[in-house]
Image: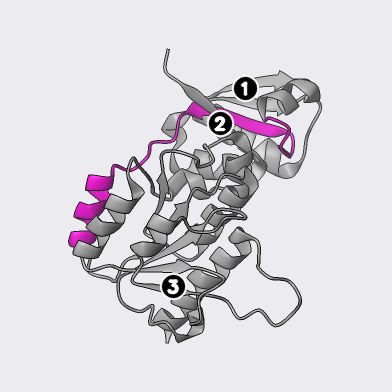
Amino acid sequence: MSKKEIIPGIHTVSTLLNHQPERAHSLWLEQNKHNTRIDALVQQARSLGIAIQSVQRTKLDQLCEGTQHQGIAASCSVTTLLDEHRLCDQLQHSDTPALLLILDEVSDPHNFGACLRSADAAGVDAVVIPQRNSAPLTPVVHKIASGATIHLPIVKTANLSRFIDTLKKLGIWVYGAAGEATDSIYTANLTHPTAIIMGAEGQGLRRLTQERCDQLYSLPMLGDVESLNVSVATGIFLFEAVRQRSC
């Protein structure tokens, strides 16, 4: 039997049905839960031949691992990750400067999902994560990402340091976020092919990852807090690239 995963939430399920309906096996609905958006998704699923199952809220809570499912979830085939060699091939043949996000052992599912959502909104070409010590694609991640996991390419690499070296050979500049960096992200040139690396909660970038960066940048902190949540910092870094490329 093929492996399946649960994708909860109205917007996430809608994204799945609109972009990858072939992945969906069934829709799980909370009993007696009705509203315009849920009813429309049920009708859409039925037209696609997708089974509908009505369950008690406690059952749906369990399936969705406690995340806010809004009364609906989809059971579907597991998310297909992009092979790193295929990503490199796509980068070599791209007509526009690449923008990649690398998450160095971000293990909190809420932060991971929020980073993916920001990456999708910023038009990132792919998100790269190491195989070890990264948050898996759980129902929580899918819900927080708000549909980004459906169509955002995600690459999982066994050796992040080596993959960074590969990206640099392809002409991609690699910039790391570090609170101790003396240069502000607002001084960086992010208009050329760029990979932005964000570190894990608390520890930041690992030493080997830092050593492979072309440059480290920080955010100017004007208040009393020492740092921002990684997902918030990710959004700021990525949209600085968006701003520069839009000028």
Per the image, the residue denoted by label 1 is 52
Q: Give the residue type that dot 3 points to.
A: Leu
- Quick one: SS at disc 2? helix
Marked residue nearer the N-terminal end (2 or 1):
2
* Residue 241 in picture, x, y percent from top left: 44, 75
Q: CA distance from mark 2 to mark 1?
A: 8 Å
Residue at the farthest front position: 207
- Quick one: SS at disc 1? strand
Marked residue nearer the N-terminal end (3 or 2):
2
The part of the chain drawn in magenta is: 65-93
Nearest the viewer among 189 and 63 is 189
Per the image, the residue denoted by label 3 is 216
Please tell me in which quadrant of the rendered image residue 65 appears: top right
* Residue 40 in picture, x, y percent from top left: 65, 39
User: Mark 2 Cα within 10 Å, few/some/many (few <14, many 20+)?
Assistant: many
Residue 45: numbered disc: 2
Disc 3 versus disc 1: nearer the observer = 3
Quadrant of the image containing the C terminus: bottom left
Nearest the viewer among 157 and 124 is 157
* Residue 109 in picture, x, y percent from top left: 61, 43
Q: CA distance from mark 3 to mark 1?
A: 50 Å
- Quick one: SS at disc 3? strand
Please report the residue visible at 44 percent of the width from the left and 72 percent of the height from the top: 216
* Residue 124 in picture, x, y percent from top left: 41, 62
Callouts 2 and 1 close, C-beta under 8 Å = yes
**In the figure, 142 relative to 61: above or below?**
below
Q: CA distance from mark 3 to mark 2?
A: 47 Å
Using the rendered image of the protein, determine whether residue 146 is visible from the camera's viewpoint. no
Q: Is residue 30 left or right of residue 15?
A: right
User: Mark 3 Cα within 10 Å, few/some/many (few <14, many 20+)?
Assistant: many
Q: Give the residue type that dot 1 points to.
A: Ile
